[in-house]
Each structure stands twice: as structure tokens, then as C-alpha cells.
Image (cartoon, rainbow, N blue to C red):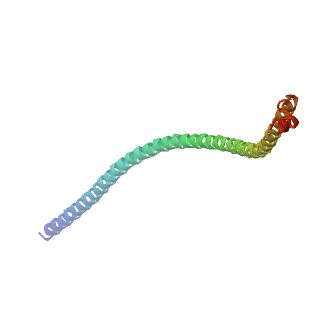
Amino acid sequence: RLLAGAGGLAAGAYYAGASYAIWEARSVRHAVETELEVAKEQKATVGRQLERTRGKLQSLGEQRVALNAQLAGLRASEKEAERRLQAAQARRGDQERELSSVVQSLEAEEDLVATLQRRGQSLQQAIEVGEQGLAAADQEVAQAWGLLNPLEHPALKGQRA
């Protein structure tokens, strides 16, 4: 019996050892399965993040293309605005030169008007003097005609009176 008991004990110990080994293997397997599930979930999460990131990357790439196109348009608009500004500045310069020329012409014309007014006044004075001289000459002519008329001659007039 002792032997049988020892054999039973040995068998029990073997069974307990084998059961422990099975339990430990199952624990390891469960741990590996758990880690595998966690890794699969993490991989799926990373995959979803990767897809979102690729979507964002594509969207950002499209935005970059659109912004580059807008920037090119703005640069072209800026160059056009600079050309228009330069043209406007050139026109302004032309107009300023034209205005300066007109002002100079106006000043010259004003000087000419003043000169002509002075000349006109001088001529008016000469005309007035000439008219006075003409009136005096007319009076002398009338007197001379009177001398031709014997009735109006001063020498005869004195005798008739």
C-alpha cells in the first residue's frame, strides 16, 4: 500500500505538475492573445489615424495648391497694379508738366495783357491829344474859312459894328 500510495502521490504530483504546466501555458497563451488583441486594436487605431492623417495631408495638399494659385493670382494682380500705378504716375507727371507749361503760358499772356493795356492807355492818351489837336485844327480851318468870307473877315466886322 505504501507503494501504491507513493505511486498515487507520484501520479498526483505528476498530474498537479502537468495541470500547472497546462494552466501556465494557457495563462501565457491568454496573455499572448490579450497582447495580440491589444496590438490588433492599436494597429486598427493607427490605421484609422493614418487614414485621417492621409486625408488631412491630401486636404492640406489641395489647400496648398489652391493657395499657391491664389498667391500667383495676387502676384499677377500686384504686378498689374504696379504697372497701373506707374502709368498713373507717368500721366500725373505729364499733366504736371502740361500744367506748368499752361501756367507759364498764362503768366506770359497776363504779362502781354498788362503790356497791351499799358500800350492801349498810351494810345488812348495819344488819341485824346490827337482829337484835341484835330479839334484845334478844325477850329483853325473854320477860322480860315471865315477869313475867306469877306463878310466874316475880322477887319470888316469891325467896320460894320
Depth check: 44 or 58 in front?
A: 58
Residue 65 rendering spot, x and y as whole percentages: 50, 41
Q: Residue at x 24, y 59 (%)?
A: 22
Depth check: 56 or 105 in front?
A: 105
Rendering quarter of residue 143: top right
Depth check: 136 or 144 in front?
A: 144
In-image side of 70 versus 112 (left or right): left
Residue 52 rendering spot, x and y as whole percentages: 37, 47
Quarter of the image with the C terminus in it: top right
Instruction: Please tell me how many numbered marks the rendered image carries.
Output: 0
Rendering quarter of residue 138: top right
Depth check: 47 or 122 in front?
A: 122
Q: Is residue 36 above or below residue 135?
A: below
Q: Name, please, the residue furthest toward the front.
A: 160
In-image side of 38 versus 62 (left or right): left
In-image side of 21 versus 113 (left or right): left
Q: Name, please, the residue furthest toward the bottom.
A: 2
Quarter of the image with the N terminus in it: bottom left
Rendering quarter of residue 23: bottom left
Residue 4 rendering spot, x and y as whole percentages: 14, 66
Q: Name, please, the residue furthest toward the left.
A: 1
Q: Name, please, the residue furthest toward the top.
A: 149
In-image side of 69 versus 38 (left or right): right
